[in-house]
Amino acid sequence: MSISQDSRYAYAVGRIRVLENKLLDKTKMQRLQNAKSVDEALLVLSETEYADLVAKAPNPYDIDAITTEEIKRVYLLIRELLPKEALADLFLIKYDIHNLKVLLKAHYQKKDFDYLLVDAGLVPAETIKSVLKNDQLSGVPKEYYAGVKAAKAAYEDRQDPKVIDEVLDRTQNAMMADMASKGGHEFYRRILAAKVDLINLKSLARVKRLGRGRAFLDDSLLPGGTLAPSFFTPLYGSDWVQLVQAFSLTSYKAVVEQGVAAYLESGQLTTLEKLADNFQMTMLREAKMFALGPEPIIAYVMAKENEVRNIRIIMIGKKNGVATAEIAERLRESYV
Amino acid sequence: MVSWFGIEAGMGFAILGAALAVFLGGIGSSIGVGIAGQMASGVVTEDPEKFGKLLLLQALPGTQGIYGFLVGFWVILKVGLLGGDPASITIDQGFQLFAACLPIAFSGLISGIWQGKVSAAAMGIVAKRPEASGKALILPAMVETYAILGLLASILLITGIRI
C-alpha cells in the first residue's frame, strides 16, 4: 500500500505548503515589472522573501548573485528535507553540467571563465575543476566523466564549441531521466519528457528559422522525450503549416499553433519559447492536487527556478532600460 | 462448556474480539495521527502560529483508537473480567461478542489511515488559506462518519447479546 511511500514526504510537504505562500504571485511580479528604476524594483524585492538577500548582498545591483544565493538556499532546503533522496540530486546536476561546459570551453579557448562557475551543484566547482585538470575519475559521478570524454572527442573532431553543449546536455538529460525513473518519480519523469520534447521543438524552430541544415538539427535533438527525434527531423524540410499539422495530434498543439502564428507575424520565436515554458508551468501546477508525495516538492523547486528566471529578466531589463511592455512579453507564468 | 487446551472457548472468543477492536482501531489511529503529525510539524516549522488549528486536525484521526478501546472495554465489562468474577460464556455467546467487535475493528483501521491522509491534505489548506480553516476541518470529519457507524454497530450488537 502507498501509505509508507507517500507519508514519507508528509513533513516536507508541510513545509513546502507554507513556503509556497512566499513565492512571488502575479501582483508582486506586476509591481516588480512596473517599477520605474532598478532601485524601485529592489525596494519591491525587499518586501518579499528576497528581503534578507537584498539587504545582505555586498552589491544589491548584482541580481545574478542574489538569485543564485536564493536558488542555493532552496537546494539546501531540499537536501535537508530529503536527505536520502536522489530527488534532490535531480536538480543539482544541471549546475555541474554548466560548470563542466564552462571549464571545457575555457580549456579549449585557453581563457579563464572561472567567474562563470556556479557553486550550487552536486559536486563543488573546485572538485570538478581539479578532476578535469588531472583527468581522474574519483569524486564525480561516472556519467560526468563519460560525458566529458565524449565532449572532448566531439570537439576535437569538429572544432566547434557548440558540440560540447550538445554532448553534455545529452548527458544531463539521460542522467536526470535515469534518476527520475529509478526513484519512481513518475511526475518528474513526465515533466522531464515534456521538457525534452519542448527543447527539441525549440531547436527545430530555431534551426529552421536560421536554415542551418538538417545535420545541424540532428545534432541538437535530444532523446528521452515522448516524441522521438525521428519525429522532428522530417519536419525540417516541410513548411511551417505542415509543422503545425504534425503537432496537431500531440499535447503541444496549442503551443505550436500560437507560437508559429506569432513567428509568421513577427519573425521572432520568443512567443513560441514563452508558450513552451508556460506549458511546463501548467503541467507543474498539477502538483497542487497531490496532498502527499514528492510532487509538491518537485513543483516548488521548479517554481522557484522559474521565479528566479523572471526576476532576472525583469532586473536586467530594468538595468538596461528595456520598456516594461517588452519585459512583460518575455516573462513566464508563475506557479502561484 | 467447550474447552480448547484448557481455555474456555467462549471467553477466548470474547477476549479476541475485544483485543481486535482495541488494536486494529489503535493501528488505524496511530498511522493516521502519525501522517497528520508529520505534515503538521512541517507547517509549524515554517509558521508556528498555525499550531492551534493544526492540533485539531491532527487529533481527528485519533478517535478510531478511542472507539476501539471503548468497544473492547465494553466487552470486558460485559463478560465480567473486570470485577474478578467472569461470567460463564458459551461458545455461541463468545463468537457473537467476537463478531460484534469486528465493525469498529475494521472501520477503525481503514478510516483512521484515510482520515490521517485527508487531515494532512487539509493542513495544506490551513497553510495556504488560513481563512478557510473551518472548511479544512469539515473534510477529514467526513471520514469520521464511518468510524462512528462502526462504533454504533458494535455497541448495538454487544448490547443485544444476552449473557
Image: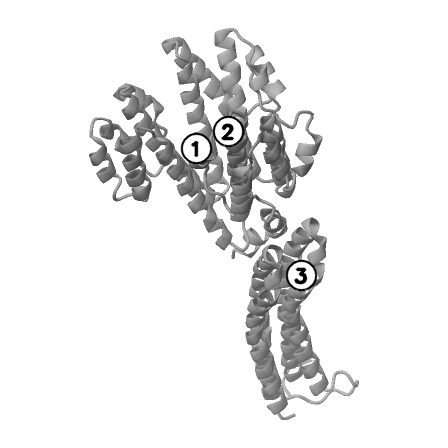
Residue at 71 percent of width and 89 percent of height: B87
**Residue A247, x across and y down, in percent:** 26, 39
**Residue A116, x across and y down, in percent:** 56, 19
**Residue B50, x across and y down, in percent:** 69, 58
Q: How many marks?
A: 3
Q: Do the residues bearing badges 2 and 1 touch, measured as CB atoms within 8 Å?
A: yes
Three-letter code, disc 3 = Leu
Which quarter shows the N terminus of chain B?
A: bottom right
Q: Secondary structure at mark 2?
A: helix
Q: Secondary structure at mark 1?
A: helix
On residue B70, the disc is none
Q: Tell me the residue that label 1 is attached to.
A: A326
Q: Tell me the residue that label 3 is attached to.
A: B54
Chain containing the residue with disc 3 = B
Closer to us: A233 or A184:
A233
Closer to us: A207 or A36:
A36
Quarter of the figure with residue A224: top left
Q: Do the residues bearing badges 3 and 2 touch, measured as CB atoms within 8 Å?
A: no
> What colour scheme was applied to this rendering of the protein?
one colour
Between label 3 and label 1, give the one nearer the viewer: 1
Chain containing the residue with disc 1 = A
Which quarter shows the C terminus of chain B?
A: bottom right
- As drawn, B88 above or below A115: below
**Residue A118, x across and y down, in percent:** 58, 24
Residue at 49 percent of width and 25 percent of height: A143
